[in-house]
Image (spheres, rainbow, N blue to C red):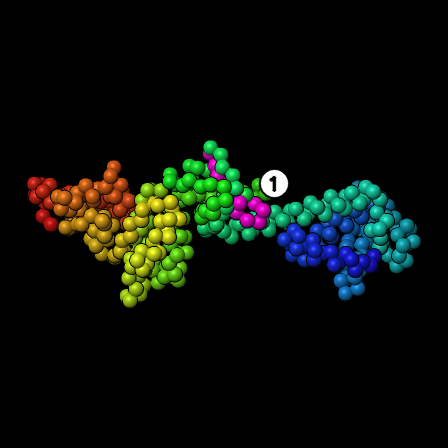
Amino acid sequence: MISKEFYRNIDAVAQEKELTYEQVLEAFEQGLIAGCKKAHDVRSCRVEFKEERNEILVYKQQMVVDEFSLEADKNYTQVLLADAKKIKQRVKVGDIIEEKIDPKDFSFYAVRDFKSRLNEALVKMQKENLYSHFKSFEHEMINARVIDIDDRHYRLDIGKDLTTLLPKKEALPKDNFHVGDHVRVYVTDVEMKTKWPKVFVSRSHPSLIIRLLESFIPEIKDGTIEIMGISRDPGDRAKIGVKTNDPKVDPIGACVGEGGSRIREIVRALSDEKIDLFRWSDNEKELIANALQPAKVVAVTHVNPKEKNALAIVPDDQLSLAIGKLGQNVKLAVQACGWSIDIKCETMAQGEGILY
């Protein structure tokens, strides 16, 4: 069959379905094979595209046998040798004989099977492409738009005609989005479901802050500054340890930005979640003291590298700040630096005879 229009339509379908030219061609091949099988009651067909000639060649295939047998290859319909010779003179038992057919002669039911298989293949390829696209964003931050809100979820448009749900338990306490708002979310998982891929997102995941830092701070993106430790009470406060691989670059200053411009954008994106930055150190005592900021630490003693625990001594008036409201500051410090930290004020240390 010759059809210039067919090949012109391939590009149009590919663009409409966001598929490649080759994928659409493969889908048409599957459809034509299904139609051929139905039209000619055979088990196997072959399709050949000759684009340079605008040709579509479809062949029904049969296996040549000397007598019908249940033991023969079940992938092919059998044809007796005598009948096969009427189609092709030089043929022998065991050969696969091909006979060209014209898709224009497909019956109603054959056309129905062709369309059904074609659409099935196109949808499957769309699903696979969509899955691959969003799978590449797994464990990354994406921008989404709020399109609906109910008591438990925000429904988000994440692009490619796909939506997902942000459970309010995965949102931040101060998040108060409205329809039309743009929001940054972290992709925790992407799964292939029966109908379409499902993308799971969160705003409470600790890695959302990492991706925001990478987005707003080029020195983190290019590796000049490294994030060494992070802990978070989502929506309230986060504590992040950073170090520089370039002595000329101050890691805290680079993250804060001129006049606080960089960190302010990140805090805004997190609905005003507070962020404590501290300088990472390979020296355990410095690391622990830095992690407890904004409290001032007089000394770090009783350091046990094997158990990774230590005692921090702070001025009397810094004890509540070091511990934090409901123990938040020390909890976040412990999680961020990986050390178990006991805290005592100077008066308590002196009373217990602790030397430091």
Q: Report which residue position mark 1 lands on.
A: 195
Q: In the displayed image of the protein, which residue is found farthest to the top? A: 151
Viewer-proximal residue among 176 and 70: 176
Question: Residue at image x 77%, y 43%?
Answer: 113
Whether residue 332 sits left or right of residue 113 in the image: it is left
Whether residue 148 sits left or right of residue 42 in the image: it is left
- Residue 305: tell me if it is visible: no
The span shown in magenta is 152-162
Viewer-proximal residue among 55 and 63: 55
- Count of marks overlaid on the render: 1
Q: Residues within 10 Å of mark 1 (few under 14, many from 20)?
A: few
Question: Residue at image x 55%, y 49%?
Answer: 159
Question: Residue at image x 38%, y 45%?
Answer: 271
Whether residue 76 sits left or right of residue 260 in the image: it is right
Looking at the image, residue 273 lies above or below residue 279: above
Question: Measured from the top left, where is residue 294 in percent x and y?
Answer: 22, 49
Q: Is residue 155 magenta?
A: yes
**What amino acid does circle 1 point to?**
Lys
Whether residue 29 sits left or right of residue 174 in the image: it is right
Question: Measured from the top left, where is residue 275 in percent x and y?
Answer: 31, 49
Query: Which image quadrant for residue 171?
Result: top left
Question: Residue at image x 90%, y 50%?
Answer: 83
